Amino acid sequence: MENMRYAIKVYYSGENFHGSQIQPDVRTVEGEILKALEDMEVEVRNFQRAARTDKYVSALGNVFAFSCDECRIEPRILNYYLPNDIRVLACKTVHEKFNPRYEAKERIYKYFLLDEGYDIEKLKQACKVLEGKHSFHNFSRLEGRNPVREIKSIDVEVSDDFIVLTFRARSFLRQMVRCMVTGIKLVASNEISLEELKRLLDPEYNNKIWASDPRPLILWDVVYDFEFEYEDFSVEKFKEEIINKLKEVKTKRIMLESIKDYLSKKF
């Protein structure tokens, strides 16, 4: 079992972390995963992630990859060493140069928006404006990157007093989803027009939009040209843990119920 490389699909509750990326002196998702692997006496090399999530942003399917010698990684074993706000649900052996960031075919985010009297028709129209290939320089924290991205779809699901927005694209810029949510809300509350939203996509126009609250955002999945091998034991244990947490505050409860329903249909 020399020169093994693994990709793991991971859930975490973002409110408990200062983001996914390892940082000194604060609790992060990568920090906890690396600590668990160290406790397992696994010598890790080339640790990489599919997506960086900010403080308070959760994930159901972020992907991390690492290499090691003479090691066997299984979700249930890794979960034994992890805190209960991080759970590995699936694992896959991958080729030695696998990069979870650059080989991703699609990233899916869900934002759980409390309906504060929004005009649903205008909200859907705003989503259509943002779909397609545009410059999202006003909807992100660029950090010198190319602002052009292609949004495959933004789906709208109205459930009780929540609106669930599902964003699909191969890649997103930093804070891009949360900034798009702000733009959608501004149109749906009649604070700006659809024409003004379109203008924000004009490469020559600069008027940055602020990012919405990170807490209702989940990195739902990262898709590759292969299927992950989900472990029944870890998925069932995770569903049990979610049921025990359904007394959480309303937004968090709706998010957890959506995760539970998704897992129940998938497995």
Image (tube, helix red, strand yellow):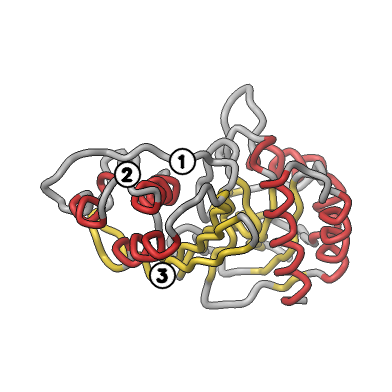
Of callouts 3 and 1, the N-terminal one = 3
In the depicted structure, whether residue 116 falls above or below residue 108? above
Q: Quadrant of residue 64?
A: bottom right
* Residue plotted at (46% across, 41% down): 212
| Residue 114 percent coordinates (x, y) | 57, 49
Check disc 3 and give the amino acid type.
Answer: Ser
Number of numbered discs on residues: 3
Residue indicated by mark 2: 191
Residue type (three-letter) at the residue carrying disc 2? Glu
Q: Is residue 252 above or below residue 18?
A: below
Image quarter in which the C terminus is found = bottom right
- Residue 130: x, y in percent? 32, 61
Q: Secondary structure at mark 3?
A: strand
Point out the tag, 3 or 2, that comes first from the N-terminus.
Answer: 3
Circle 3 is placed at which residue position? Answer: 153
Does 45 sit left or right of 190 as displayed? right
Q: Residue at x 69, y 42 (%)?
A: 34
Q: Quadrant of residue 222?
A: bottom right
Give the farthest residue toward the top. 25
Residue located beneath label 1 in the image: 212
In this view, the residue farthest toward the left is 204
- Residue 42 on image: x %, y %: 75, 48
Front-most of residues 121 and 217: 121
